[in-house]
Image (cartoon, rainbow, N blue to C red):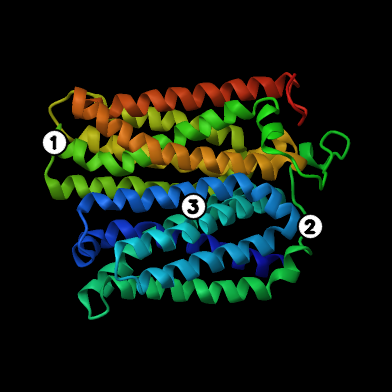
Amino acid sequence: MYALLLSIIYLAFISLGLPDSLVGAGWPVMHSDLGVPLGFAGILTTIIAGGTIVSSLASERLTRRFSAGSVTAVSIGMTAAALVGFSFSDAFWMLCLWAIPYGLGAGAVDAALNNYVALHYAARHMNWLHACWGVGAAISPFVMSFALSSSLGWSGAYLIIGGIQVVLTVALFISLPLWKRVNPVRPAEVDDPEAVPVSTGHVPLSQALRIGGVKLILAAFFAYCALESTAILWASTFLVEDRGVDVATAAAFASLFLLGITAGRFLAGFVADRVGDRALIRGGFVAVGVGAVMIAVPVGTDVIALAGLVVAGLGSAPIYPAIIHSTPVNFGARNSQAIIGVQMAAAYTGSTLAPPLFGALSTWLGLWLFPFFILALVALGLAMSERLNRRVDHGELAGTPAA
């Protein structure tokens, strides 16, 4: 039963990643077929991001009322319907319309699944599950490539991924009885009912934000997701334009950043239970910082900068899952769903705002700013997470609103 449900959750995480690369992979053809400018992709992604932020903030109330399993099943059903809707869209406004349920479904399932795994499964599974997201994100461009090279076209890629999610939705509804039969597997700090009382009562957003230390972890999570999305979008351009790296080489190493995140999460899963979430977060930020310094070093060879990008990807790997997994310990199981929902909103906000912010700054100051922009976000994330650790060590967090 435990293993069966875990397998379904692994598939759900792969499915979360599957649609994420479709717009980017197919847009060069999609915008031409739909007769809209290339820049309209930003409108689509903004609508999706807005939906994920809204549903992330509402996830605590939804999950408490309908259960994590039900929210997951319905949310993936919404994304499946949206993807199928994309496949039948022949006008840009139709894509925008279907982007609404897609964003709402993606945000709700992300928050619900992350909290359920944080409460019921060990740290190694959190890392491996997020690695599965990377597998899904890596698969979808190949699906789009196959569809474009055949008679299916870009709409065929959306229909294929949508069909996969329809099948997963059916499997999730069938598995609903299992979700309530898996006992929580939590660290000792969460098991003490007096230290961390588990309540079924609703935790309002305003109350969650007033819990001691929450704003610190939100800032750390915002910083991490901001640096990750900035590196994914701008690394290749920086290497080509600022360092004069060959276009093909730059593209290959930029993709290694994302592959490094995926591989690093698989590797982190083997040591996560022994090392602990705190060490993974600290070590991850330090490694990203080392990678950024390697990218910034003005030497005559490109090897150090290219290696630095790989180091930064590997360092990024454990930060996201470790922050999520540590939430019930730091803030209490009763508050974890609400706080993880807010964390997801902070993550999507950072991922949405940071790349265009860097784009504006680099236009003004130059692309040389790239590694220093990453270092600034590393410093912010590390400083906020370490401040939270000190408050935890001093017993200042009790899962109640701060005075």
Which residue corresponds to mark 3?
A: 266
Circle 1/circle 3 CB separation < 8 Å: no
Check whether the beta carbons of the residues at disc 1 and disc 2 lie within 8 A of each other.
no
**Real-space Cα separation, disc 1 to disc 3, in angstroms:** 33 Å
**Residue 65 in picture, x, y percent from top left:** 75, 56
Q: Which residue is mark 2?
A: 183
* Quadrant including the N terminus: bottom right
Nearer the viewer's eye, disc 1 or disc 3?
Answer: 1
In the image: residue 176, left or right of residue 342 = right
Crowding near the residue tagged with mark 3, few <14, some 14–19, many ≥20 C-alpha atoms within 10 Å: many
Q: Who is closer to the viewer here, 6 or 93?
A: 93
Between marks 3 and 2 in the image, the one whose residue lies nearer the viewer: 2
Question: Residue at point 42% right, 32% down?
Answer: 287
Q: Position of residue 28 (x, y in %)?
A: 21, 59
Disc on res. 368: none
Residue 334: tell me if it is visible.
yes
Q: Earlier in the sequence, mark 1 or mark 2?
A: 2
Q: Residue 274 lies in what quarter of the image? A: top right
Q: Earlier in the sequence, mark 1 or mark 3?
A: 1
Q: Are marks 3 and 2 in contact (CB under 8 Å)?
A: no
Amino acid type, callout 1: Glu
Farthest bottom residue? 151
Q: Amino acid at mark 3?
A: Phe
Give the spatial CA distance, label 1 vs label 2.
Answer: 53 Å
Asked whether residue 259 is in view, the answer is: no
Asked if residue 249 lies left or right of residue 45, the reply is left
Q: Which mark is residue 241?
A: 1
Residue count near mark 1 (Cα–Cα under 10 Å), binned few <14, some 14–19, many ≥20: some
Q: Earlier in the sequence, mark 3 or mark 2?
A: 2
Q: Amino acid at mark 2?
A: Asn
Residue at 31% from the left image edge and 36% from the top image edge: 356
Instruction: Name the spot of residue 53 as percent of width and height, x first.
Output: 52, 45
